[in-house]
Image (cartoon, helix red, strand yellow):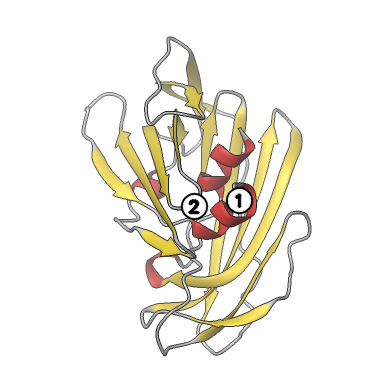
Amino acid sequence: MRSVLGFLAVLLALVSAGQALSCIQCVSPRNPSCDGLSVSCLLDNVCGASYTVTTSGFSVVTRNYMRGCVTKNQCNLQGSISVINVMNRFGVSCCNTDNCNPSLPTLPAVNTTFNELVCRTCISADSDWCYTKDTVHCTGDENMCLLQTTSITGAVSMNTALRGCATKSLCDLGQQTAENAGQKVDVRFICTSGTAGLYSGLTLSLVAILLTNII
């Protein structure tokens, strides 16, 4: 479950290429700070930091902090996703000078008030599809039901899927696929309001969490 949820928790695309900004690339599984090597980013990237806190009930399960190159449309992003009895809250912050240190990302406040939306919930660690009768009652700003599929190809190959509640900020990110060190990651979110049945597809490149949690 940790590796599957990790793909959603961190939205940094750590892709080294181009002649634009240089950014520090690092990962810390506990503390909200880290230091590492400087890498060259793509031309449309800035330096970013992502901070994710995973909770089950009122207990913190994991914390994850990352720095690296990030696309501009991810700056100031924050949101959450809930699957079964686990919630991931995440935030992204940015700065735009060489090897700058982004401020600590702001996480959305915890809101346990039910918003009347009920979504199917499941996790598959070996398939790009899951569907069960189990449901989760959505809370706060998690006003979208989602089916998320992840396809990883390269030296390590796998497919995963999950269903649950999510904030609309996830569904508004757009579409992106990333490759790094021979690995290709494609993540697709199929989002619906739960009543209107309007779906939108998007993919997120999450290479860094792949390299830390899968390889």
Q: In the image, what residue type sits under mark 2?
A: Ala
**Relative to residue 140, is residue 201 depicted above or below?**
below
Image vertical order of residue 168 relative to residue 1, above or below = below
Which circle marks residue 215 in the picture? 1
Mark 2 residue crowding within 10 angstroms, few (<14) / some (14–19) / many (20+): few
- Residue 155's tag is 2
Identify the image quadrant of residue 176: bottom left
Q: Seen in the image, is 204 located left or right of residue 23?
A: left
Query: Nearest the camera: 43 or 168?
Result: 43
Q: Image point 56% across, 48% down: which residue?
A: 9
193 left or right of 19? Answer: left
Q: Residue at x 50, y 20 (%)?
A: 136
**Marks 1,2: beta carbons within 8 A:** yes
Local SS, label 1: loop
29, above or below 130, in the image = below
Frontmost residue, 190 versus 80 = 190
Residue that protrudes farthest toward the front in the picture: 155
Question: Where residue 79 sits in the image (x, y, percent)?
Answer: 50, 48
Q: Nearer the viewer, residue 105 or 54?
A: 54
| SS category of the residue bearing label 2 | loop
Image position of 159 (left or right of 49): left
Query: Where residue 128 sits: x, y (%)?
Result: 38, 31
Query: What is the CA distance from the residue labelled 1 to the residue labelled 2?
Result: 9 Å
Tag 1: amino acid: Ile
Which of these two is toward me, 187 or 119?
187
User: Which residue is located at x 41 percent, y 41 percent?
Assistant: 150
State whether residue 54 is above or below residue 30: above
Q: Quadrant of residue 23?
A: bottom right
